[in-house]
Amino acid sequence: MSAIAYGVGVGPGDPELMTMKAVRLIKENDVFAVPGKDPREAVAYKIAVQAVPELADKELIAIDMPMVKDRELLAEYHKKGAELIEDYLRQGKNVVYLTLGDVTVYCTFSYLQHIIEADGFQVELVSGIPSFCAAAARLGIPLTEWNEPLHVIPAFHSDSDSLKDPGSYVLMKSASRMKEVKDILRESGRTVNVVENCGMETEKIYRSVDEIPDDAGYFSLIIAK
């Protein structure tokens, strides 16, 4: 089948950080899938439309991706989302799925990709600048130096989690347990920096554990060195 489903990362928030390839694909295509019930309210759309204003006049598909932990329910939503995209692919129309950050890092498109490929359609991934790279640059600090490892963790999953391994830690999706995460950060003795809503108008920077509010927003990224 000749039509392609593109997973396109639009970067962390600043439209100037979008890649030239992402901009070109948005200009060249007519159908766009966006996670959420209202595509025009999606963060990825709001970023992309600033870089490519003509996106506002193109066809948008809402891909509902509820934030729940019920795997069976999620599988149903993923199947529905994949089917919506496949309907256009069967018509010979490419579909560009816009996603925040990079399309290979904790990305909702990954779930759809598996289904779409299994159904015989072609998928291509277009990398975007990951949020943790952009956050480190915004803070003016290197993520790693010399032979230090880098650990990227999607929040904490148990009270026994710690930061004892050598190297730098990136903590993503920690907002729902921020108070607990702050306790672990204090105990680690590490240098902590946080960027909330990196690259967006609502961006905030915290330079210590004590500065981080317990109700920090969902897009709060922690770097512990």
Image: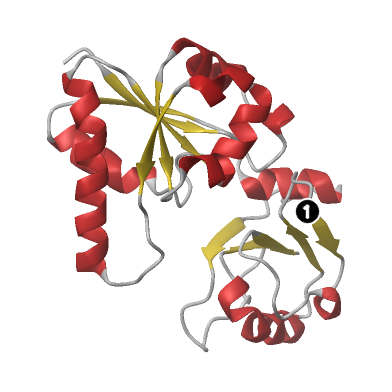
Is 203 situated above or below 210? above
Q: Position of residue 199 (x, y in %)?
A: 75, 44
Q: Residue shown at 54%/23% (left/top)?
A: 55
Q: How is the image coloured?
A: secondary structure
Residue 43 lies, in percent from the top left, at 58, 45
Callout 1: helix, strand or loop? loop
The residue at the point 52 percent across, 89 percent down is 159
Q: Please state if 13 lies on the left or on the right of 212 as rendered.
A: left
Q: Where residue 224 appears, x then y in whole percent? A: 73, 66
- In front: 17, or 155? 17
x, y percent for residue 11: 61, 37
Please state which of residues 152 and 28 is positioned toward the viewer in this rendering: 28
Going by the numbered disc 1, the residue's amino acid type is Thr
| Residue farthest front in this picture | 57
Callout 1: 10 Å neighbours few (<14), some, many (20+)?
few
Q: Nearer the viewer, residue 188 or 87?
A: 87
Is 29 left or right of 21, judged from the image as shown?
left
In which quarter of the view is residue 85 placed?
A: top left
In this rendering, the answer to whether 212 lies above or below 127 is below
Q: What residue is drawn where x is 71% and y is 54%?
A: 197
